[in-house]
Amino acid sequence: MRLPSDPHAGYLDAASAEPLHPAAREALLAALDHGWADPRRLHAEARNARLILDNAREATAAALGVRRDEVSFTTSGTDAVHRGLLGLLGERRRGTTLLHSAVEHSSVLHAADWAASMLATTSRSLPVDREGRLFPGTVHEALEEVDGTSTLAVQSANHEVGTLQAIDELADAAPGAPLFMDACASMGRIPLPRGWSVAAGSAHKWGGPAGVGVLLVRKGSPWRNPYPADDRVDERGSGFENVPATLAAAAALQAVVAERAETSARQHALVARVREAVTGIPDVEVVGASDDRLPHLVTFSCLYVDGEALVTRLAEKGFGVASGSACTASTLAPSHVLEAMGVLTHGNVRLSLTRTTTEDEVDRFLALLPDVVRDIRAEVGL
């Protein structure tokens, strides 16, 4: 079987999964021979695995600027979100209210639904502006209307449109409510803000292997494990860690943070070029913040175009992108994020650059996009 010379050429969906970072590959291969044993045992093989796991935790903590004992590893970013948020809700007294932005990831919304039935909590969705931004005043007003304890859930950056939330200011507006921060879209790409009590990240979003999540619990935060007890030493984790993958995730995170300034500057410039170019196509709307955003992500919606058809046609041309607004067979519902922002929900494309995306790839994408949009519109008589 022949493989392409550049296996990632045309791949513009890093927000779904970033290609494996070379540092992660190197660490993974090195750890496979030494990190396979149960790190809780006392024999030599276990001590090797324990050393690797400790190194991964230390490296992750250093890269994120947190304490070593605040870092735990889970089986995925979704697992980290569920454990992190439910652990806050379960530690608060029954009947607490969860306040969350209307543009949170579905994993947060699913956890809220589960908590409502299992923990007798209630939840309230807080409105955002057309850029997807939640304002501190909105949080403050909602807290004044809550009778009882409250927990606040706000993502650090939106996974569909890239808008950054002012976590520092939102935390200041809710001094009595612990803040859960879904950082899966941003961890490693931007520095962690202050003000959160519990945070979650996902390794495959920054170039680590899939199947590794990061759960951060600030020392002194009102959190307890919401699931049945495990005999593992780390009570926040989810069983037997994949030690080699955990080390690879930490190695990728360290490398991404070290490269962040240069990578972010280059990606910001490329995304700015995309934002400017697509607005020249008739009836196309760029959504999300223009400045306070993730450096690698841009989303735009094309009127009179089906998002799924657009993604499929671009794939045929050699470009892998995503659509946050494509209706699914199970729900037939558009993106709740775009709906909450009050922007066009159909014909949506999310383009997210990898660390190796080149100017040439972006230019080729921009050169063919107008014709693809025009052809799809022509097929439906527009």
Image (cartoon, grey):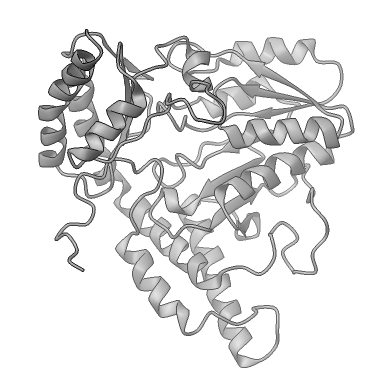
Compared to residue 138, the image places residue 352 above or below, namely below
**The N terminus appears in which quarter of the rendering?**
bottom left
Which residue lies most toward the right here? 94
User: How many numbered markers are drawn?
Assistant: 0
Compared to residue 7, the image places residue 166 above or below, namely above
| Image spot of residue 231 (x, y percent) | 80, 69
| Image spot of residue 52 (x, y percent) | 53, 75
- Residue 178 seen in the figure: no
Left or right of 205, for residue 361: left
Residue nearer the viewer, 201 or 329: 329
**The C terminus appears in which quarter of the rendering?**
top left
| Image spot of residue 89 (x, y percent) | 78, 36
Q: Residue at x 61, y 85 (%)?
A: 47
Residue nearer the viewer, 135 or 311: 311
**Quarter assignment of residue 72:** bottom right
Left or right of 253, for residue 225: right
Residue nearer the viewer, 303 or 105: 303
Which residue lies most toward the bottom here? 44
Q: Residue at x 60, y 82 (%)?
A: 37
Q: Residue at x 22, y 57 (%)?
A: 7
Q: Residue at x 46, y 45 (%)?
A: 187
Left or right of 364, for residue 104: right
| Image spot of residue 137 (x, y percent) | 61, 11
- Residue 334 seen in the figure: yes
